[in-house]
Image (cartoon, helix red, strand yellow):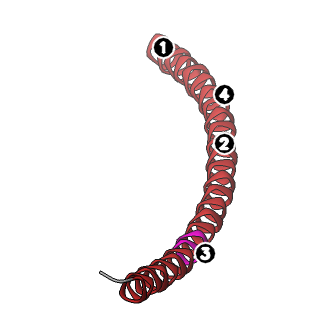
């Protein structure tokens, strides 16, 4: 192989290497852009999840408070019903004595 053919072969290899390098850099740039989009999407999902979690917890707390209030009212009503039952028994017992 003479020097001229060797030089042409080296020039061709160098050109192909430069082309491959350029393609790899473009591919890497695309990968970085897609990764950035994925990171932004994940960040958005994390924010939405955090807000949803907060909303669900607030709803849970409100439901718990409502249940407590209902239980208190139910206890009050039960006491009144018990007192009325006793009064009815006393009244019915008094009528039987007459």
Q: Residue at x 50, y 77 (%)?
A: 27
List x then y, in percent, for residue 61: 68, 40
Residue where numbered disc 2 is placed: 66
Which range is magenta? 28-32
CB contact under 8 Å: marks 3 and 1: no
Q: Residue at x 59, y 61 (%)?
A: 42
Image-quadrant location for residue 69? top right
Residue where numbered disc 3 is placed: 33
Q: Residues within 10 Å of mark 4 (few under 14, many from 20)?
A: few
Which of 94 and 2 lies nearest the eye of the viewer?
Answer: 2
Q: Which mark is residue 93?
A: 1
Residue where numbered disc 4 is placed: 76
- Of marks 1 and 4, which one's residue comes earlier in the chain? 4
- Of marks 3 and 1, which one's residue comes earlier in the chain? 3
Which of 15 and 11 lies nearest the eye of the viewer?
Answer: 11
Q: Is residue 32 above or below residue 67?
A: below
- Of marks 2 and 1, which one's residue comes earlier in the chain? 2
Q: Name the residue furthest left.
A: 1
Quarter of the image with the N terminus is bottom left
List x then y, in percent, for residue 25: 56, 75
List x then y, in percent, for residue 68: 65, 32
- Of marks 2 and 4, which one's residue comes earlier in the chain? 2
């Amino acid at each position: 192989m003479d020097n001229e053919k060797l030089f042409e072969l080296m020039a061709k290899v160098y050109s192909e290497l430069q082309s491959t390098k350029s393609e790899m850099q473009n591919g890497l740039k695309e990968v970085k852009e897609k990764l950035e989009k994925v990171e932004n999407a994940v960040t958005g999902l994390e924010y939405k999840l955090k807000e949803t979690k907060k909303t669900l917890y607030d709803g849970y707390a409100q439901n718990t408070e409502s249940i407590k209030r209902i239980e208190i009212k139910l206890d009050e009503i039960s006491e009144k019903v018990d007192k009325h039952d006793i009064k009815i028994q006393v009244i019915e017992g008094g009528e039987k004595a007459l």
